[in-house]
Amino acid sequence: MRVLSSITGSQGHARDMLPLIRAIADAGHDVLVALPPSLAPVYADERVRVEPVLPEMHDSIMAVMKEGAEQRAAEAKRTGLPVAPPPEMTAFDEMLVMAGGPHITPTYRALMALALDFKPNLVVRDSAEIAATLVAERLGLRHICGPSGAGDMVDPVRLVDMLDERRAELDLPPAHDPTALYRFGRFDSVPERYSFAAFDVPYAIRYRQSPIVARDEVLSREIAGLPTDKPLVACAMGTVLVQLRQFFQFGPPQDEDPSKVLLQALAGGLSELDCYAVLATGGLSMDGIEVGDNVHVVERMAQPLLLQCADLFVTHGGYNSIRESMFGGTPMAVLPQFGDQPFHADLLQKMNLGRVIPETTADVVRDTCRQVLSDPAITAEVRRAQREMLALPGVDTVVPHLESLALP
């Protein structure tokens, strides 16, 4: 079997897909993974061919913003009216544009060039990466998508017209079919009871979340040696801190660096909590930020392993982080920032798997963490979710299904 896999977005997306891609490769199949350059290190030690040719997420966002600004400027010139402000968009609108906007066309071309050389007989894509579906349509291949929080927020009905615009640009026949994205199925790695799918989509083939992502991952001796007489709190924002810093440096002007504001709130809140905390900074500087003696600051941590022994996880609400926390039986306090994160945070709270941190201040971080740590109902629900996740089959069990989809 020769599998073309495409991944977009952040490192969380790459980690979402890694257990599935690894299972395919470990079964002896040839896999080509196309992704942005910043995600390539996630697959550096895997037995796959890595092609870092897809656009970075921030470049795609800037391209969409630029095109919108140019369209508004052209309309103002045509009508003689002032340039209109950018339209207000919900997170669902943003996910839709990122799934089917004009940047999909050059992504398709990059993928098609790889496909013509690699000659795959199956496409396995990140569910937020739609261009690979069009490549599969062109080549007459079957396609299936892996788990993705951003993909779960894409409305397949509203996406129809946008994708047909892309098909027209690429001389592909229109589909007029909301189910075209999932014609050959989709994967997820949470139990149906805890699904984060926002729209009516086909039933998912489900497999168990992997407790280990990096093959050589271990808990550091410093973290393993922390005292056990108080709750252990893990705090990580994925790549959010770095992305906020990038938007501050290269995006529209802002009064304060949002990454520093977020770090100050997290460090301050955890310092005032009766706990031992591990705070991952993503490599950002902590200069000028006060940290209590109870907070162990690291650049990165073995998150899936730490969540198997932590009492609380303070997170941005990325889908991969949520699943890892559920697998570890760890309640969550969620401080969402953008994209799919607010949707995940609200749904997670409704499921009683944790609580949303409503403000980015140290006091609110501290108080929300206290609330979650002291709520036995949240702990009970998270443990229930953990048991249901452990009842799912291992990811290697889906490989025979993929083999049945692959064309001869």
Image (tube, rainbow, N blue to C red):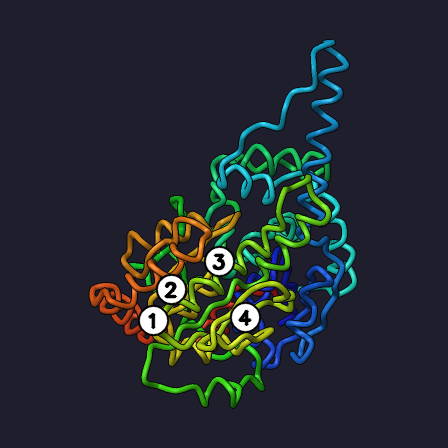
Occupied quadrant, residue 297: bottom right
Q: Distance between the residues labelled 2 and 4?
A: 25 Å
Residue beneath disc 1: 389
Q: Are the two marked residues, 3 and 1, in contact with CB atoms closer than 8 angstroms?
A: no
At mark 3, the secondary structure is helix
Left-right relation of 19 to 133: left
The residue carrying pointer 3 sits among few (fewer than 14), some (14 to 19) or many (20 or more) residues within 10 Å by Cα, namely many
Q: Name the residue under label 4.
A: 280
**Residue at (77%, 14%) from the top-left corner?**
77
Where is residue 271 shown, x and y percent of the image?
44, 69
Q: Does the image show residue 397?
A: no
Q: Nearer the viewer, mark 3 or mark 4?
A: 3
Which numbered circle lies on residue 265? 3
Determine crowd level at label 2: few under 14, some 14-19, many 20+ residues with C-alpha closer than 10 A: many
SS class, disc 1: helix
Question: Residues at badges 1 and 2 in contact (C-beta under 8 Å)?
Answer: yes
Identity of the residue drawn at 63% across and 59% down: 242
Q: Which of 361 and 108 is in front in this view?
A: 361
Gap between marks 3 and 1 measured at Cα: 32 Å
- Which amino acid type is shown beneath numbered disc 3? Ala
Q: Which mark's residue is nearer the viewer, 2 or 4?
A: 4
